[in-house]
Amino acid sequence: MKEMKYEEAVRQLETIVDKMERGELDVDSMAAQLKQAQELVKLCKQKLKHTDDEIQKLLGDQ
């Protein structure tokens, strides 16, 4: 998955969830979208963890 900002990943996740809730995905599309959603969630978690680590580091340096 290409590098993207947290906000973009969240927007993509919201789009996938919206399509699922409205029943706009067939079975094949749903499987692909779920896989993409998993990757986006992983990316978001990594970015949040990195940000948290950076904040903790900065606070620890004071």
Image (cartoon, rainbow, N blue to C red):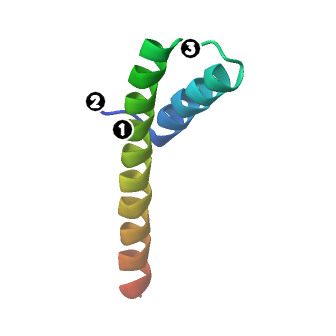
Q: At x 41% / y 77%, what residue is drawn?
A: 56
Q: What residue is shown at x 36% (from left), y 70% (from top)? A: 53
Determine crowd level at label 1: few under 14, some 14-19, many 20+ residues with C-alpha closer than 10 A.
some
Mark carried by residue 1: 2
Distance in Å between CA atoms under marks 2 and 1: 8 Å
Q: Secondary structure at mark 3?
A: loop
Using the image as rendered, state which of residue 43 and residue 50 is in the foreground: 43
Mark 1 highlights which residue? 39
Q: Residue furthest right?
A: 22
| Residue located 44% across and 30% down the image | 34
Q: Which mark is residue 27?
A: none
Place of residue 15 in the rendered image (x, y in percent of width and height, measured from the top left): 60, 24
Q: Residues within 10 Å of mark 2 (few under 14, many from 20)?
A: few
Rendered residue at 44%/44% (across/down) = 41
Report x, y in % for residue 3.
30, 33
Q: Quarter of the image holding residue 50? A: bottom left
Q: CA distance from mark 1 to mark 3?
A: 18 Å
Q: Which residue is mark 3?
A: 25
Which picture quadrant has residue 37? top left
Which numbered disc flags the more N-terminal residue, 1 or 3? 3
> Which is nearer the N-term, disc 2 or disc 1?
2
| Amino acid type, callout 1 | Glu
Choose mark 2 or mark 1, whichever is in front. 1
Could you tell me if the residues under marks 2 and 1 are in contact, i.e. CB atoms within 8 Å? yes
Question: 32 or 58, which is in the foreground?
Answer: 32
Question: Compared to 56, does 44 lie above or below?
Answer: above
Q: Position of residue 60 (x, y in %)?
A: 38, 86
**SS at circle 1:** helix
- The amino acid on which the numbered mark 2 sits, given as a three-letter code, is Met
Element type where label 2 sits in the image: loop
Q: Count the marks: how many?
A: 3
